[in-house]
Image: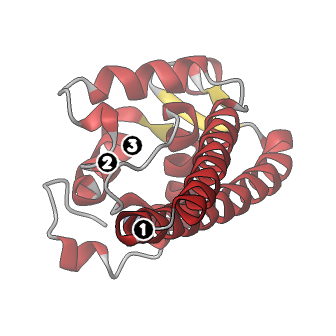
Amino acid sequence: MESTHIQEARTVHCCQCLICKKETFFQTKNPKMKTTRLVLLILKSLKVLKPQIEYYSLVKDILPFINDHLPLFQNLKIFQNGKWRKSILDALNHSAQVESGREVCKNRGFYKIKEEENKVVIEKNKIKDEMSNNLEILENELKRSLRLLEEMKMIQTNEIEKNETLFICESKRASISIIQNLQLLLYHLN
Ligand SMILES: [Zn+2]
């Protein structure tokens, strides 16, 4: 992606970076991703697109990359309050997995992923993604059967049957809340 202005989604589709590969995730209604995780994905994507560069410049590489991918980022919380530049910069400066090029480049605003973290982090995030996806499938499945049970309850006339359905509904609700807690724990796991 050479251009720095906002590209159309059609153009983004041709891009081979990690962000574009996660397109379906970013297009969900409320995609949850920590900003520290997002900046790692951005730096990794830049490595795919511009492998020759060691430290990526905030002004010349990172911000143009984000602008090119804005259609994909729109559903992320930090892009909805107009303060995403500050959030991205904070994440770059505070992430333990990001190395500043201040000394090598003799300038501020240059970043790369710490080499030794790279492999471990990629592996860990892959597992986290997999777990999160499976939990989401499970949650949707439970919600679906809960809806069906509630419809059933409406037309049931026998009190004993009704109570049984009520009991199963409660247990489904408890399971859904356990899954939601697990998702939250997973989300906050570094
Ligand atoms: Zn891309």
The residue beneath circle 2 is 66
The answer for how far apart the CA atoms under marks 3 and 2 are is: 6 Å
Q: Nearer the viewer, residue 115 or 90?
A: 90
Residue 11 horizontal side relative to residue 57, left or right: left
The residue beneath circle 3 is 62
Residue 72 in picture, x, y percent from top left:
30, 59
View quadrant of ligand 1: bottom left
Instruction: Categorize mark 3 by other alpha carbons within 10 Å: few (<14), some (14-19), many (20+).
Output: many
Instruction: Categorize mark 1 by other alpha carbons within 10 Å: few (<14), some (14-19), many (20+).
Output: few
Is the C terminus in the top left, top right, bottom left or bottom right quadrant?
Answer: top right
Q: Are the two marked residues, 2 and 1, in contact with CB atoms closer than 8 angstroms?
A: no
- What numbered label is drawn on residue 157? 1
The residue depicted at 63 percent of the width and 51 percent of the height is: 167
Q: Secondary structure at mark 3?
A: helix
| Of marks 1 and 3, the one in the foreground | 1
The answer for how far apart the CA atoms under marks 1 and 3 are is: 62 Å
Q: Is residue 45 visible?
A: yes
The residue depicted at 29 percent of the width and 57 percent of the height is: 69
